[in-house]
Amino acid sequence: MLIFGGTLASIVVLDYGSQYTRLIARRLRELNAYSVILPGTSDLAQIAAQEPKGIILSGGPQSVYDPGAPRFPTGLLESGWPILAICYGMQLIAQAVGGTVKPSQLREYGKVGLKSYQGELFKHVEGEFVAWMSHGDSVEAAPPGFAVTAATASTPIAAMEDAERGIYCLQFHPEVRHTPKG
């Protein structure tokens, strides 16, 4: 059971339209964590009302360059909550804090070999593992303060983190069964 400070962990999942959002919530329940799915457009007060111990930004079908593409709430990155951003969520964060997001030269759909580097999320994962990718845009340059923690043959920034601020970003989908070490 995930318990922080004597209480059951509550994780807010911000939904950006991913086909896997409910699967993320299910995986959290399998870890005995309570989760709440909120629209990605929720404001900080709506999120804070859930008293979260952490936030997950889901993936989604949009490009960060689409007109009207959803954004995360103002103040989220400064909230102090640990954040895990998946796919589109990673691209949102990268673009918001000074990274570069570009349409991928080679879209990745399906299983890929992912090479992990030492970082908080991968400290118990050695070398290469299989992960599930489904993206058209990629982070081309990590934002200041972020370390690149994983790569694939066609995506040099498949994961990045700012461990000091507790912000962890994955281009791949750890929630699907096709990512065995997710």
Image (cartoon, rainbow, N blue to C red):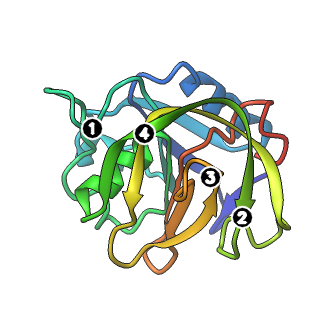
Q: Decide: marks 1, 4 in contact (CB < 8 A)? A: no
Q: Position of residue 46 (x, y in %)?
A: 29, 40
Q: Earlier in the sequence, mark 1 or mark 4?
A: 1
Question: Dot 2: within a 10 Å radius of its alpha carbon, few (fewer than 14), some, or many (20 or more) residues?
Answer: many
Q: Is residue 59 visible?
A: yes
* Amino acid identity at mark 4: Ser
Task: Give SS at disc 2.
Answer: strand
- Residue type marked 2: Ser
Q: What type is the residue that disc 3 sits on? A: Ala
Q: Which residue, given by chain and number where applicable, does mark 1 sit on?
A: 64
Q: Which residue is mark 3?
A: 9
Mark 3 or mark 4, earlier in chain: 3
Using the rendered image of the protein, determine whether residue 13 is visible from the camera's viewpoint.
Answer: no
Mark 2–mark 4 distance (CA, rounded to whole Å)? 20 Å
Label 3 or label 4, whichever lies nearer to me, is: 4
Query: Helix, strand or loop at disc 4?
Result: strand
State the separation of the CA atoms marked 3 and 4.
Answer: 36 Å
Residue 110 lies, in percent from the top left, at 69, 28
Residue placed most toward the observer, 121 or 51: 121
Say what amino acid the circle numbered 1 marks.
Answer: Val
Q: Earlier in the sequence, mark 3 or mark 1?
A: 3
- Which residue is under mark 2? 116
Report how far apart the C-alphas of labels 1 and 2 lie in the structure.
25 Å
Image side of residue 27 versus residue 167, left or right = right
Give the CA distance from mark 3 to mark 1. 30 Å
Which residue is nearer to you in this view: 77 or 182?
182
In the rendered image, residue 31, in percent from the top left (x then y), is placed at 77, 44
Question: Label 2 to label 3, Cα distance in Å?
Answer: 27 Å
Q: Are marks 3 and 1 in contact (CB under 8 Å)?
A: no
The residue at 85%/67% (across/down) is: 126
